[in-house]
Image: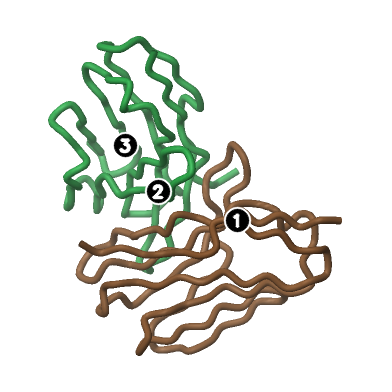
Chain colours: A green, B brown
């Protein structure tokens, strides 16, 4: 399978803990995006990378959130000191030269 | 800010009937409009898209129309089948960036 993959698929954590998610984009896709989706809503943009450069960040991405794409391939999204409001599906997408973004299966985070 | 409104939020149709989902966008400079299908527990899957220089695009049972003047675009599914049941999201590409603004989704149920 050569689609976007995300790990883990599910994460349950206690409030105040740190969590890290990984995204592996489609091979050779130079753009990578993170979105957050809460129940009953559409995905909301968090940030995107072109190669290893983080080019845009949403206001939704508070200081507790950090994303990296160190070698322009896979990316990680870390949430520090998690809060119950962070519970959501975190989606990763990738694209090549065009506008089409292809999404992964998501990581569902539950903060207790 | 930029937003995309989507209607209806839920839609039930009999198998074989047509389904229409409508979206309105606010950013007049948006130039790319994808539609995604999301099944339970999965990431969004791109099903069709349209660019602003085209008024209509069709792919088998799925079609999308765009009215730039009114800033409306619609998804049309003909001869619906039970496997079409899912949540459908429209999106608009925010001008000058690579981020999508998503609608709030339409839960389509095709009754056998």
For marks 2 and 3 on the same chain, the one whose residue lies earlier in the sequence: 2
**Is the residue under label 1 in contact with that under label 2 (CB below 8 Å)?**
no
CA gap, disc 3 and disc 1: 35 Å
Quadrant in the picture for residue B16: bottom right
Q: Is residue B67 above or below residue B91?
A: below
Image depth: mark 2 or mark 1 in front: 1
Tell me which chain the residue with mark 1 is part of. Answer: B
Q: Residues within 10 Å of mark 3 (few under 14, many from 20)?
A: many
Name the residue carrying label 1.
B10
CA gap, disc 2 and disc 1: 18 Å
Name the residue carrying label 3.
A75
Name the residue carrying label 2.
A43
Tell me which chain the residue with mark 2 is part of. Answer: A
For the N terminus of chain B, the quadrant is bottom left
CA gap, disc 2 and disc 3: 18 Å
Residue ID at (46%, 83%): B66
Q: Is residue A106 above or below residue B75?
A: above
């Amino acid at each position: 399978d050569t689609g976007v993959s995300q790990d883990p698929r599910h994460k349950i954590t206690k409030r105040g803990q740190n969590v890290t998610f990984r995204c592996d984009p489609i091979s050779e896709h130079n753009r990578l995006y993170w979105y957050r989706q809460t129940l009953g809503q559409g995905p909301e943009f968090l940030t995107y990378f072109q190669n290893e450069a983080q080019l845009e960040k949403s206001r939704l991405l508070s200081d507790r959130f950090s994303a990296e794409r160190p070698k322009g391939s896979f990316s990680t999204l870390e949430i520090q000191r998690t809060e119950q409001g962070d519970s959501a599906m975190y989606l990763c997408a990738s694209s090549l030269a065009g506008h089409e973004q292809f999404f992964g299966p998501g990581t569902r985070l539950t903060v207790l | 800010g930029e937003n995309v409104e989507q209607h209806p939020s839920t839609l039930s149709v009999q198998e074989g009937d047509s389904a229409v989902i409508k979206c309105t966008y606010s950013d007049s400079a948006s130039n790319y409009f994808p539609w995604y299908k999301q099944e339970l527990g999965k990431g969004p899957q791109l099903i069709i898209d349209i660019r602003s220089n085209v008024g209509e695009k069709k792919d088998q049972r799925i079609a999308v129309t765009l009215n730039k003047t009114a800033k409306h675009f619609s998804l049309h599914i003909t001869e619906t089948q039970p496997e079409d049941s899912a949540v459908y999201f429209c999106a608009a590409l925010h001008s000058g960036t690579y981020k999508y603004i998503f609608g709030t989704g339409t839960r389509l149920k095709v009754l056998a």
